[in-house]
Image (cartoon, rainbow, N blue to C red):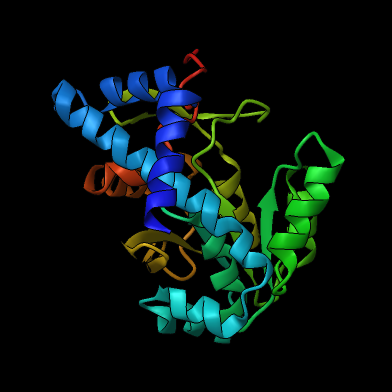
Amino acid sequence: MLPLLRLLAWLLRYVFRFRLPVARDNLRRALPELDAPARERVLCRQYQKLTEVIVELPWTSIATAEQVRAHLRFTNLPEVHADLAAGRPVLVLAAHLSNWEWMLHGLAVDMGAPVYAAYKPPHSARADRVMLALRSRLGIRMLPAKKLVRELMRLRGTAHVTGMVADQMPTSSGGRVWLKFLGRDTAFFPGPAEIARLGNYRAYFAAQRRVRRGYYEVEFEALNAPGEVLEVRTFTERYAARVEALIRERPEEWAWTHRRWKLQPP
């Protein structure tokens, strides 16, 4: 498998040049303390990790709950379980780090409560059906972003988990929170903070790290205390700070190919 992964990563970078200029520019601007050879090493490892995520994705179509638990370990579940046992809903915010698709399945098998996940439907109806089948196979209930708030307000007062990958560029969002992120003016969705406030959620950042190929661990880092209501900017700052810290710790794990900084601040 390893030679095949290396070949696919090489093709992705050197033959197809998948968003290579975007990735190089993002790295240069976000991590200027790294010299050019160091950035190229990060870029090489990032294409390797991206290839692993692509190859690992089909496994979710056949994986059992026991196999998911074996490959994805949550390190501090008791705190989250205590919130759910107390009747508090839990908001889990992730980022495009390591294998976020596998993390979703880990939530489904280990939370012990209904799990909902926000997603943006792709333009292709066929692709939407395929991704929904993959993501919902172990019990995740997928909610389109446009219906998210309405559905979550219906769940107020019930113990459940809502998962979101919140480091995307908010192109269609009605509002944006502008922060300094990796040294650059960056727009974030205000939605997670608003959902946490309106639904009285206990919020956690899911810090996912790759242990070795095909094995991951996730640590839940609390973004608020039980019952603590935060302003939108404060909440978003806490989330962004944790994402940035994890990127600086393991820069090869983030999706540098994403066009994250297309928007300009007002």
Q: Position of residue 251 (x, y in %)?
A: 28, 41
Residue at horizontal 73 percent and vertical 45 percent from the top: 145
Q: Is residue 94 above or below residue 123?
A: below
**Foreground of the two, 242 or 258:** 258
Q: Position of residue 159 (x, y in %)?
A: 65, 77
Q: How many marks?
A: 0
Residue at horizontal 42 percent and vertical 42 percent from the top: 7
Q: Residue furthest front?
A: 3
Would residue 96 be seen by someone viewing this image from the given angle? no
- The N terminus sits in image quarter: bottom left
**Foreground of the two, 96 or 175:** 96
Would residue 228 be seen by someone viewing this image from the given angle? yes
Residue at horizontal 76 percent and vertical 42 percent from the top: 121
Residue at horizontal 49 percent and vertical 26 percent from the top: 18
Q: Position of residue 113 (x, y in %)?
A: 65, 80
Q: Is residue 218 above or below residue 48?
A: below
- The answer to which image quadrant residue 42 occupies is top left
Q: Is residue 105 above or below residue 7?
A: below
Q: Position of residue 148 (x, y in %)?
A: 74, 51
